[in-house]
Image (cartoon, helix red, strand yellow):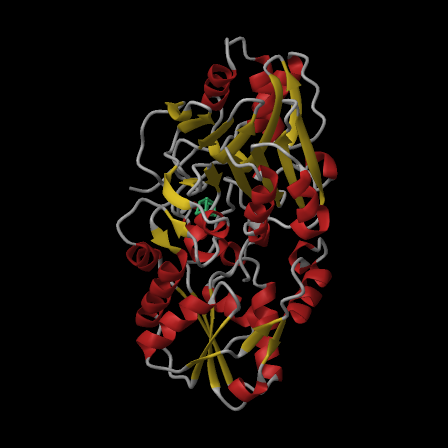
Amino acid sequence: MAGPREACGVFAIFGDDEAALKTYWGIFSLQHRGQESAGIAVVGPDGDVTVHKGMGLVTEVLRPEVEAARSGRAALGHVRYSTFGESTVINAQPLLMRTRFGPLALAHNGNVVNAPGLKAELERAGAVFQGTTDSEVLAHLIARSRREGVREALLESLGALQGGFAFGVLTRRQIFAARDPLGIRPLVLGRTDRGAVVVASETCALDTIGAHFEREVAPGELLEIGPEGVLSFRFAPVAPPMPCAFEVIYFARADSRIDGRSAHVGRRALGHRLAEEAPVPADVVVGVPDSSLPAAMGYAETAGIPFDFGLVKNRYIARTFIAPRQQDREMGVQLKLSAVPEVVRNRRVVLVDDSLVRGTTSRRLVQLLREAGAREVHMRIASPPYTHPCHYGIDTSRATELAARNMSVEEVRAMVGADTLAYLSLDGLKAALGEHRWCLACFGGGYPVPVPGVAEPATRA
Ligand code: SF4
């Protein structure tokens, strides 16, 4: 809840008579990944690609009855929170480019770390950029490729990108889907009972439209989904996936599975481990809704302390955290969450949150619990200190704003006003997430893809 903000969500479907409507529901279920803009591109019966998009939530920008009326059997949708590029409608996606391969719509989640260098090269070669997103860099690379077909142009262009990214591309004939060479950003493949093929940032979008999960899109893989079925190509060598650990900790919807691991089960395991590492005498365990509740339940189970709903969420405030000014964000917390006095009054409360990035939300939550009568507030964070900014598509703000980078644990405790504060250890995180390689860069675990201009350690063995 107090964690960083997600970048984007991508959804695409091929072979469904209601492609645009299914895409509407698909991106609706990915709304938690981005609330700034939403859009859907469809291939119409005339073979042209049209895009509806705008600033705001899916339900504010698009209407299901309008999408249902858009005929076409292939569509691509996107929800966005800007991590690179300004928050303006020109950066809303899908982007639509007219190329020698025909119209191309493009949607992207993540961050291309070498985009600034590629963009400068493209501009020197005469390319004109309309917006400021790195997605446009891929569009220009494809448009300028000398390769014969769009697939070859995509393979060449994707091979030039570095970072953590997942792309969906819609053409007149097919959709393409690609995942970065280490599989940092998520992308899954599914199928409906009627044979339509779906790709999505999370499995929850498959479930929403009644599609079955088939497999993860492999790191460095380009899928071409069209009349010939699902064809697989590689733009980078085979490598074991290294997904973003924060998807399990916070970003993904609790009912999604990240590289085979349920986000809900993973969060509960983090809570178990946290209780083993940082026990404290208390009367009740409270989690920050919604993403921290499984970790709080796990903590309570292992600690043998009752879990209760000491904080409740106002479900009708969805976008407070995109407020640009700090005072607006703090007011947003106040509007978004309330303490339940009957749960916390005169009690020693363990407050479990999934992450602590800036610390301003945590400070307000501790204050809310104290105002509701809590006798003690012990803050427990179900992830390690967040010390390094993410360069792979997650907005964690600048390094100077990261509380744990600039303060000791005791200083952070004093800042948030808790009686005690403890984080999960990095080893504890690895143990709870199980046998898998994870990107752990924001916890000081080393950047798995070097970031131009950033002198930080590479991934630790
Ligand atoms: S640096 Fe952190 S937030 Fe970014 S991809 Fe890696 S684990 Fe995820």
Q: How many numbered marks are there?
A: 0
Q: Residue at x 33, y 78 (%)?
A: 303
Q: Residue at x 73, y 38 (%)?
A: 89
Q: Position of residue 239 (x, y in %)?
A: 31, 32
Q: Position of residue 293 (x, y in %)?
A: 46, 69
Identify whether 29 is placed above or below 284.
above
What is the quadrant of residue 319 in the picture? bottom right
Identify whether 158 is placed above or below 218.
above
Q: Residue furthest bottom?
A: 346
Is there any visible trace of residue 437 in the rendered image?
Answer: yes
Q: Nearer the viewer, residue 342 or 427?
A: 342
In the image: residue 422, left or right of residue 49:
left
In the image: residue 82, left or right of residue 425:
right
Q: Position of residue 307 (x, y in %)?
A: 42, 79
Task: Point out the image quarter for the C terminus.
Answer: top left
Task: Point out the image quarter for the N terminus.
Answer: bottom right
Q: Residue at x 50, y 48 (%)?
A: 209
Q: Nearer the viewer, residue 370 or 318?
A: 318
Identify whether 215 is placed above or below 106.
below
What is the quadrant of residue 186 in the picture? top left
Identify whether 352 is placed above or below 233.
below
Q: Nearer the viewer, residue 16 or 298?
A: 16
Q: Nearer the viewer, residue 150 or 48?
A: 48
Is there any visible trace of residue 83 in the rendered image?
Answer: no
Q: Residue at x 46, y 30 (%)?
A: 178
Q: Position of residue 194 (x, y in %)?
A: 44, 40
